[in-house]
Image (cartoon, helix red, strand yellow):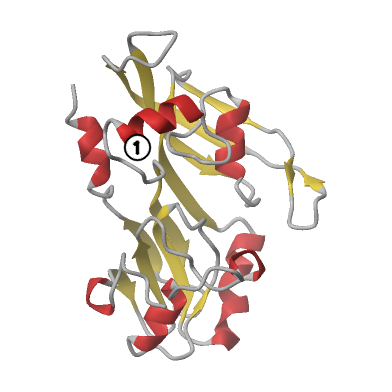
Amino acid sequence: MKNENLSQDQLHIVFEDAHCLVVDKPSNLIVHHSYYARNIEETSLTDLIRESGYPEASPVHRLDRKTSGLLLFSKKAEWVSEFQILFDKNEIEKKYLALLRGFVPEEGVVDSPVKNDRGNYKDAETRFRCLEQFERDYVIPPYEKQRYSLVEMVPVTGRMHQLRIHANKMTHPIINDPKYGNRHHNHYFQEELGIHELFLHAYQLKFRQPFTSEAIDLQAPLPDFWNRFFNAE
C-alpha cells in the first residue's frame, strides 16, 4: 500500500555524493519496515528511495515515524558500518527543534535512563536550549492562557524515543506526542487548530564523510504545519 503523504516526486534529497545521501523526512512516514513497524502496511521512506534509483540504499540511523527531518542513508549496505562508526565515536551531531508545553529553562541537561529495545534501562543524556517562548489565548482547563517553548534538543546518546521521554521527564512534553505528551494540549491542537503532526524536527546534521573526509553541515527548514502555530495569536 502506498503512503499518501509522500510520492517519489516529493522526495526531498538535501545532500548526495558517491557514498551517501541525506533526506528531509516528512512527519508520519516510517523509515523502514523494522520489527516495530512490522504491522504497518505502507510504503516506507527506504522503499521510496530505492524505487527512485538507489536500489541498495540503507538508513544509517532512524527517526520515529512521527518525527520529521534529516536522515542519513548509505548508498550501499556494505558501507553502512563505516557511517555508523561516526555514531559510535560521537563524531556525528544531530540537533532537533521541538515545541514543548510550558516555559522551559534557558538551558539544561536531562540524564535520566531510557529503556532500550530489550526493555533494559540504559544511560541517556539530552542537552537542551530554549530559543523562544510563546503565550497563546487557548482555553485548556484549568487555564485560559497557555505557555509554550521552542527548544533546541541535542541527544548525546541515541536511545529510542529519548527526546520524547526526556521532554516528558522535564514536565514539558512535546506537543502532539501521542505516547508521552499531554492529552489535553494534543486534543486542542488537533481538534481546534487542525494540527495532528508531532512538533519534533531533526533540523541539523553535521559529520565528516568517512570516505572523503568532507565536512558536511546540513539544515532542514521546519515543516509548514509549524507556521500554523507561529502565525496564530
Q: Is residue 199 left or right of residue 119?
A: left
The vertical placement of 233 against 68, above or below, is above
The vertical placement of 93 against 191, above or below, is below
Q: Quadrant of residue 28?
A: bottom left
The image shows residue 118 at horizontal and vertical percentages of 80, 57
Q: Is residue 232 left or right of residue 85?
A: left
Q: Which of the pair 232/195 is nearer the observer?
A: 195
Q: Which residue is mark 1?
A: 190
Q: Residue at x 46, y 20 (%)?
A: 104
The image shows residue 5 at horizontal and vertical percentages of 31, 64
The image shows residue 210 at horizontal and vertical percentages of 52, 74
Q: Amino acid at mark 1?
A: Gln
Q: Quadrant of residue 117?
A: bottom right
How crowded is the residue under tag 1: few (<14 C-alpha within 10 Å), some, or many (20+)? few
Is residue 213 something one can see in this rendering?
A: no
Q: Residue at x 58, y 30 (%)?
A: 168
Q: Exactly how many numbered labels are in the figure?
A: 1
Q: Residue at x 35, y 80 (%)?
A: 17
Q: Which of the pair 185/199 is nearer the observer?
A: 185
Q: In which quadrant will I find the N terminus?
A: bottom left
The vertical placement of 156 against 109, above or below, is below
Q: Secondary structure at mark 1?
A: helix
Q: Residue at x 19, y 27 (%)?
A: 232
